[in-house]
RNA sequence: GGCGCUAUGGUGCAACGGUUAGCACGCGGCCCUUUCAAGGCUGAAAUACGGGUUCGAUUCCCGUUAGCGCUACCA
């Protein structure tokens, strides 16, 4: 295979949690871009922070990606197995003078803008915050003499490696979403490349790997935008040209703060469990921060790939709208040919233990008919095993609200009994025959058809909310309908 | 605090100097109807604020405000 000039992109999660919605969207954009361009998607696990890494979470992330239908072409590669590369790069930077050894005490992140400050008396009078300590961007160690360094080394002071950021000038890079960017070097601190424990920081490892893996486009969350100049600096110091960056806007919760556990489910796994279809989730996610132009919304994956482009990625953060996600799910549950949803419903029935030995498993044609009848009012896959349970098993209950609402008339038990007899006597079992028989019984009893129809629905499927009665009867079959009616009679006693 | 990014109905997106500012979700109403959905029709709802530039600004520039991001030996 000849080297190609096709784009190479990567999705690089760190195993500090499950695959969350934001990461999934970033992965999706990378994938759509790669597929659209005929390029390559690489998966890289950024596990250089031994403190908070949970190796066991990697599988969950891979599973999440697979569920979403995002396939990578190379990897997963683990940064923890490439540590020599980063150290070598740090040495090269040290040798060229682009970096320097730092002997400062490591400062742990304290959240916010810190200044430990310490004991604050309660509401001192003219408090006024006091003078904020201006953080210096240049590390004092950058100007240490050789003698000083030797002394520190001799004394065994731990050494980290920092990048020697130019004091003057500006650094620029190209962002496919935000346009050409430029920041003053004076704003950039002498950031750490290699920690005193010998492990690389994100800034170093990400650049070394992206160079080594020949990544052409870095598509990632906009939270990395501010740090990108540092990486551009490293690229050049390493003698490489920075790639094209593409920062995609963040996904926020309903309160417009960054999406987090506080907002409820944020892992893609939880959406899979909740009964969303992967393609619906993909369609929804794709439209968060990207638009195909015009007013198109319902886009099958092939259309997503066909129309995706970085230039139409938005620059504004988007709020995750659960209601719209559900709407997309109903679309995918209801619009495609039944065959499309059958496998998902089958999996759902198995999950609920309703598949083995069921008519659904024995009779594919019947299964398809049943699903076709049920799906117009489903929103999540779970609907097939909750309110539609009675279609797949005789083991179902009568919903309390349904009984209260439709089993009020005291003539019902005898009517249901009569209906069972009338239906049982039917020679042909079809919609119109069931319809005529039912209305006949209601008329003979002097009751409005609706009363009997609604009561019957509860008797045969246990729910007030279900598909049209006579179609339901046809699908369920005469034997079952008659048996269920007779079984229900004793229960249909007001009070 | 510093630096940066962003700003169209409640939400997601259109309109990339000229439209009665469009579509979708959600919400209300009507139709359909055997429950509930779906579907059809329909209603309310937005260019954050203030200055410019221009014959003309949602669109370009500046300021204000707000939100978010970064400012870690986390990624």
Image: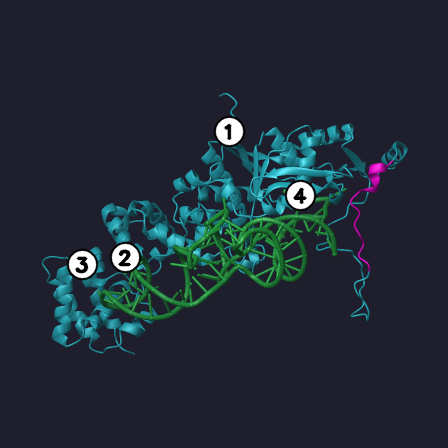
Chain colours: A cyan, B green
Q: Secondary structure at mark 2?
A: helix
Foreground disc of the pair 2, 1: 1
Q: Which residue position is annotated with label 1?
A: A6
Q: Residue B18: x and y, percent?
A: 46, 52
Foreground tag (4 vs 2) = 4
> Nearer the N terminus, badge 1 or badge 3?
1
Cα distance between the residues tagged 2 and 1: 51 Å
The disc, 2 or 1, on the residue closer to the chain's N-terminal end is 1
Above or below for A452 versus A50: below
Same chain shared by disc 2 and disc 3: yes
Q: Which residue is mark 4?
A: A227
Local crowd size for mark 2, using a 10 Å CA cut-off: few (<14), some (14–19), many (≥20): many
Query: Is A483 colored magenta in this rendering?
Result: no
Do tags 1 and 3 sit on the same chain? Answer: yes
* The residue stretch that appears in magenta: A131-144
**3D distance between C-alphas at marks 1 and 4:** 26 Å
Check residue A391 in the rendering and tell me which mark sits there, or answer none: 2
Task: Tell me the quadrant of the picture where the C terminus of chain A can be found.
Answer: bottom left
**Is tag 4's residue or tag 2's residue first in the polypeptide sequence?**
4
Residue for point 61% across, 29% down: A212
Q: Is residue A133 left or right of residue A413?
A: right
**Which of the two labelled residues, at mark 4 and mark 3, occupies the earlier sequence position?**
4
Look at the picture and state if B74 lies above or below A153: below
Q: Residues within 10 Å of mark 3 (few under 14, many from 20)?
A: few
Whether labels 4 and 3 share one chain = yes
Residue B35 picture location, percent across and down = 29, 68
Residue A155 lies left or right of residue A92; in this view the side is right
Which residue has dot 3 on it?
A479
């Amino acid at each position: 295979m000849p080297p190609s000039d096709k784009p190479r992109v990567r999705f690089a999660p760190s195993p500090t949690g499950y695959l969350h919605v934001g990461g999934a969207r970033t992965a999706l954009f990378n994938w759509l871009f790669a597929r659209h361009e005929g390029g390559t998607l690489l998966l890289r696990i950024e596990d250089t922070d031994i403190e908070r890494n949970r190796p066991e979470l990697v599988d969950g992330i891979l599973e999440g990606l697979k569920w979403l239908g995002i396939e990578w072409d190379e990897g997963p590669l683990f940064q923890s197995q490439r540590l020599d590369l980063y150290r070598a790069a740090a040495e090269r930077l040290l040798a060229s003078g682009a970096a320097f050894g730092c002997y400062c005490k490591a400062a742990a992140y304290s959240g916010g803008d810190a200044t430990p400050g310490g004991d604050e008396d309660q509401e001192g009078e003219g408090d006024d915050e006091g003078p904020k300590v201006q953080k210096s961007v240049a590390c004092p160690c950058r100007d240490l003499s050789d003698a000083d360094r030797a002394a520190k080394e001799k004394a065994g002071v731990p050494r980290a490696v920092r990048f020697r950021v130019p004091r003057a000038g500006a650094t620029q890079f190209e962002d496919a979403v935000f346009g050409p960017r430029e920041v003053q070097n004076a704003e950039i601190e002498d950031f750490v490349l290699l920690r005193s424990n010998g492990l690389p920081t994100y800034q170093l490892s990400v650049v070394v790997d992206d160079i080594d893996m020949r990544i052409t486009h870095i598509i990632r969350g906009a939270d990395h935008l501010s740090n990108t100049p540092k990486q551009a600096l490293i690229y050049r110091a390493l003698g490489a040209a920075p790639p094209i960056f593409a920062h995609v806007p963040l996904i926020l919760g309903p309160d417009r703060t960054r999406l987090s556990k506080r907002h409820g489910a944020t892992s893609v796994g939880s959406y899979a469990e909740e009964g969303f279809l992967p393609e619906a989730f993909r369609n929804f996610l794709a439209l968060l921060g990207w638009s195909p132009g015009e007013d198109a919304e319902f886009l099958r994956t092939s259309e997503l790939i066909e129309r995706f482009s970085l230039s139409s990625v938005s620059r504004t953060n988007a709020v995750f709208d659960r209601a719209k996600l559900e709407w997309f799910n109903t679309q995918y549950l209801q619009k495609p040919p039944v065959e499309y949803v059958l496998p998902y419903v089958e999996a759902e029935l198995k999950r609920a233990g309703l598949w083995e030995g069921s008519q659904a498993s024995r009779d594919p044609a019947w299964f398809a008919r049943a699903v076709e009848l049920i799906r117009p009012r489903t929103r999540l896959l779970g609907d097939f095993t909750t309110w539609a349970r009675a279609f797949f098993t005789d083991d179902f209950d009568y919903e309390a609200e349904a009984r209260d609402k439709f089993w009020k008339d005291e003539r019902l038990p005898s009517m249901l009994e009569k209906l069972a007899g009338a239906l049982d006597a039917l020679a042909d079992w079809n919609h119109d025959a069931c319809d005529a028989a039912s209305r006949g019984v209601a008329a003979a009893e002097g009751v409005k058809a609706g009363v009997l129809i609604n009561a019957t629905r509860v008797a045969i499927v246990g729910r007030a909310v279900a598909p049209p009665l006579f179609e339901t009867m046809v699908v369920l079959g005469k034997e079952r309908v008659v048996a269920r009616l007779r079984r229900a009679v004793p229960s249909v006693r007001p009070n």
